[in-house]
Amino acid sequence: MAAALETLQSLLQTLGEIKDLPLNRESLESLIYWRDVKKSGIVFGAGLITLVAISWFSVISVFAYLSLLALFGTVAFRIYKSVTQAVQKTNDGHPFKEYLELDLTLSQEKVQNIAGVAVAHLNGFTAELRRLFLVEDLIDSIKFGVILWVFTYIGAWFNGMTLVILAFVSLFTLPKVYENNKQSIDTYLDLVRSKLTEITDKIRVAIPIGNKKPVAAAATESDKDK
């Protein structure tokens, strides 16, 4: 969990360093922490409706219907503004001129920055999986096995799309709950973390194979035995 939070934080920091990227760290935090209730409500509602629709219908059908709905709205608004300008004899121009002139191109530098972040995290993820599956540290591999065992029950209770919906809802609720109750939540998290550390240390002492000795230390002990 801590590794996942650190990965997300570093990813947000990298996005925040890309100043020209529309969805930088500040805008993402503003959405999930509901700084602007109207914007967050629109994004949350639209995203939730889309995910629920995808869980009931195919992705192609959802995309086609949403695109048709958006197209119908823009065409109707375009016609309405044209009629209004003709009646009032005004020349306000195209109603979507501001958005038509918006630069949506991605520079090569932006693509390289994003690709670099993705590759770095992918390499770290691959190295961590190798370490866990090949039992570099017995205790960590056992904890990983427990997590996988828990996931088998989660998979039996929920399908993949349900988990995506729950994750999306959690993204827009848990950060705000944590912000409003940070002190009490941190107290309980520290308590749980200390208990887990205590239990892990006891297991490492009880299972010698779970203790990793540095190479230099092992060599020193070998020389002393001689």
Image (spheres, rainbow, N blue to C red):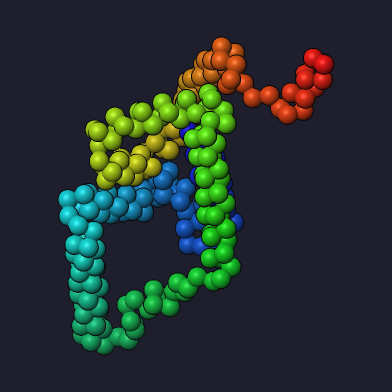
Would you say 145 lies left or right of 70 here? right
Residue closest to the eye, 54 or 219: 219
Would you say 52 lies left or right of 104 here? left
> How many numbered circles does the render carry?
0
Q: Position of residue 102 (x, y in %)?
A: 44, 74
Would you say 127 lies left or right of 165 here? right
Q: Residue at x 52, y 54 (%)?
A: 118
Up/down of 108 relative to 217, above or below: below
Q: Is residue 142 visible?
A: yes
Q: Residue at x 68, y 24 (%)?
A: 213
- Quadrant of res 137: top right
Up/down of 8 relative to 205, above or below: below
- Quadrant of res 147: top left
Q: Residue at x 41, y 49 (%)?
A: 31
Residue closest to the eye, 84 or 135: 135
Q: Position of residue 22 (x, y in %)?
A: 48, 62
